[in-house]
């Protein structure tokens, strides 16, 4: 999918928000991507998930997993497109775990998906979880890569769109210095 088409859909669905945001990575930004707005529309969920699934065509995948909350619907829909199981990992005592009877068997080939990747923190936690359970992570997929090419997961990393959006450490944030109120829209520590 062309970047212009992705941005057109994002604009239509009001995915891109401007302000002063605390990202789940702990960084600050003047832009927040609320990809949950995509998932309220099954047709857009299917379009983006199919696009992501296509990027891993030819890989043998047994399971697709995503971190809660942003990766739940994406994992399900990508798994549906591929025809495999979907799982999600969630935090318990601030540690990513499989709950609800979910399991990964030793040797299962796992695709990790997330809606937006900035620092890759949640994805790295899920990768560690999968490996600790004996699964083999074969790739990482995301709708939006806003990492600016700074992340190496050690496996193929594919995105539908790459966006260069500035992020700041709290101490260096010009929005903080201007006194603009900070908003925490993400799901971490819910």
Image (cartoon, rainbow, N blue to C red):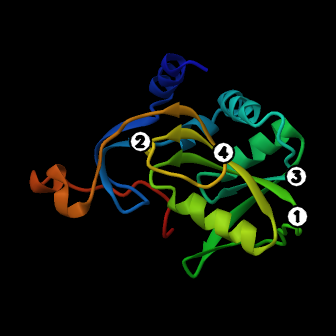
Q: Earlier in the sequence, mark 2 or mark 4?
A: 2
Measure the C-alpha gap from mark 3 to mark 2: 30 Å
Please name the residue shown 62% across and 60% down the image: 68
Do callouts 4 and 1 mark residues in contact (Cβ within 8 Å)? no
Residue 72 as seen in the image, left or right of residue 134:
left
Q: Which mark is residue 85?
A: none
- Could you classify mark 4 by the number of other residues whose Cα lies within 10 Å: few (under 14), some (14-19), or many (20 or more)? few
Q: Earlier in the sequence, mark 1 or mark 2?
A: 1
Measure the C-alpha gap from mark 4 to mark 1: 18 Å
* Eye-nearest disc, 4 or 3: 4
Vertical order, 82 against 178 (above or below): above
Q: Which mark is residue 148?
A: 2
In the depicted view, which residue is nearer to us: 152 or 22? 152
Q: Which mark is residue 107?
A: 1
Please name the residue shown 43% across and 60% down the image: 24
Measure the C-alpha gap from mark 4 to mark 3: 16 Å
- Could you classify mark 3 by the number of other residues whose Cα lies within 10 Å: few (under 14), some (14-19), or many (20 or more)? many
> As drawn, which residue projects farthest toward the bottom?
93
* Eye-nearest disc, 3 or 2: 2
Q: Earlier in the sequence, mark 3 or mark 2?
A: 3
Q: Which residue is mark 3?
A: 62
Across and down, in percent, residue 40 comes to 62, 38
Residue 66 as seen in the image, left or right of residue 148:
right
Q: Quadrant of residue 136?
A: bottom right
Measure the C-alpha gap from mark 1 to mark 2: 32 Å
In the depicted view, which residue is nearer to us: 141 or 80? 141
Q: Earlier in the sequence, mark 1 or mark 3?
A: 3
Vertical order, 186 against 78 (above or below): below
Across and down, in percent, residue 162 comes to 48, 33
Q: Earlier in the sequence, mark 4 or mark 1?
A: 1
Q: Which mark is residue 156?
A: 4
């Amino acid at each position: 999918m062309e970047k212009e088409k992705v941005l057109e859909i994002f604009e239509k669905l009001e995915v891109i928000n401007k302000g002063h945001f605390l990202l789940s990575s702990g960084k600050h930004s003047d832009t927040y991507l609320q990809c949950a707005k995509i998932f309220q529309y099954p047709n857009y969920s299917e379009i983006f998930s199919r696009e992501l699934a296509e990027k891993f065509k030819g890989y043998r995948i047994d399971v697709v997993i995503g971190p809660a909350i942003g990766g739940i619907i994406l994992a399900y829909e990508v798994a549906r497109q591929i025809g495999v199981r979907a799982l999600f990992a969630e935090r318990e005592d601030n540690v990513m775990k499989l709950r609800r009877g979910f399991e990964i068997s030793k040797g299962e080939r796992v695709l990790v998906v997330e809606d937006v990747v900035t620092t890759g923190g949640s994805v790295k936690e899920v990768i560690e979880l999968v490996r600790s359970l004996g699964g083999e992570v074969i790739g990482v997929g995301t709708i939006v890569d806003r990492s600016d090419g700074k992340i190496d997961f050690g496996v193929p990393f594919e995105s539908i769109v790459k966006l260069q959006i500035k992020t700041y450490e709290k101490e260096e944030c010009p929005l903080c210095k201007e006194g603009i109120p900070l908003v925490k829209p993400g799901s971490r520590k819910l």
